[in-house]
Image (cartoon, grey):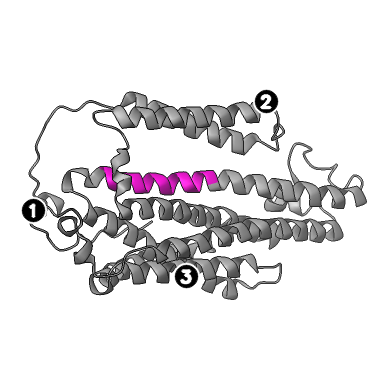
Amino acid sequence: MLIIALKENVTRSKHQLDYLGAATLTGSVVALLFAIQEGGSTWAWGSPQSIGLFAVAVLLLALFLRVEARASEPVLPLALFKNRFVTLASIGGVILGTVMFGVSSYLPLYVQGVRGGSATEAGLILMPLLVSWPIAAVLSGRLVMRMGYRFPAILGSLLSMMGALCVALFNMQTSYILAIFPIIAIGAGLGLISNVYILSVQNSVPWNVRGVATAATQFFRTMGGTIAIAVMGTVLNAQMGARFATILARFPGGISHVAAQDSPANLLVRPETRNLFSPSLLVQLQDALMQSLFWVYLLTAIVAAGAVIVALYVPRGRAEEHAYREARGDEAPVSAPVVHVDMG
């Protein structure tokens, strides 16, 4: 289909790659992620290592912004963020990535560690999300054409928030049938809002920057999810450390027969080690893991609530009213909105 139907007018020109911008941005992100991941576990938050890494992240970010302001062809043009849709999509992308990565990373841990399920069952718990996302993404294109960006953005944000709140209420007795509905809501909500943000960005910027504008929103989604995983992992480890220590103090030698280097959470995931615990110890450890996961799920729900606030700032009106010509006042003809389906 691409060979037959895709026709492009390609204009080739020489470009100057922004190596310094890419290097400073990468260094800043790596330092930040490393500080979040290792802080509070490998070393204390107030240690020289943590403070030094956070300082490096801030300094490199400041240098990156300075480089981008002067670069002839910046890797991330700062002028893009004068566009309201680009700014909203970037903030929304961070939230979307946080919810998406949080749910997909920590729901399987609930199934295996708390419910004692298999790896297959842990994978199947995400199936409703993976099915509802592309269906909602397709529907969002029709909603945007008929009702504009605002309604599907608000609807998707509300669905994601309500689904995340329901996940936070999961317990050891929650049935898989009941768990399906909030997961469907999360997938449908993410499918709606992800497509709305991509559409709004692509249709509100000139053609020559459409690629970098789209890539920028995807970058913020990935970074939001990556940072969120590190933060959630830190929260989970802190919660488990406090709860598991109390339980294991009541069971001296309760895990002495398994690998000492493994955390109880990892041991709960594997059937061959989980079966080595006594029934009373196993139940208490599973309950402690569930209580620890609650704070991760609650954090996800709070972030998802931020998506509702961002959606309220999406301008009213039909998509055509916010296309590039109307937004900038140029004389170039305006085509119908480009429908881009984001499958997650």
- CA distance for labels 1 and 3: 37 Å
Is residue 216 on the magenta stretch? yes
> What amino acid is labelled 2 in the image?
Pro
State which tag comes first along the sequence, 2 or 1: 2
Q: Secondary structure at mark 2?
A: helix
> Measured from the top left, where is residue 230 in percent x and y?
58, 43
> Measured from the top left, where is residue 28 in percent x and y?
48, 31
Q: Which mark is residue 158?
A: 3
State which tag comes first along the sequence, 3 or 2: 2
In this figure, which residue is indicated by the disc labeled 1?
Answer: 332
The quarter of the displayed image where residue 72 is located: top left
Badge 2 density bin: few <14, some 14–19, many ≥20, Cα 10 Å: few
Q: Secondary structure at mark 1?
A: loop
Q: Is the C-beta separation of discs 3 and 2 under 8 Å?
A: no
- CA distance for labels 3 and 2: 42 Å
In this figure, which residue is indicated by the disc labeled 2?
Answer: 48
> What amino acid is labelled 1 in the image?
Ala
> What amino acid is labelled 3 in the image?
Leu
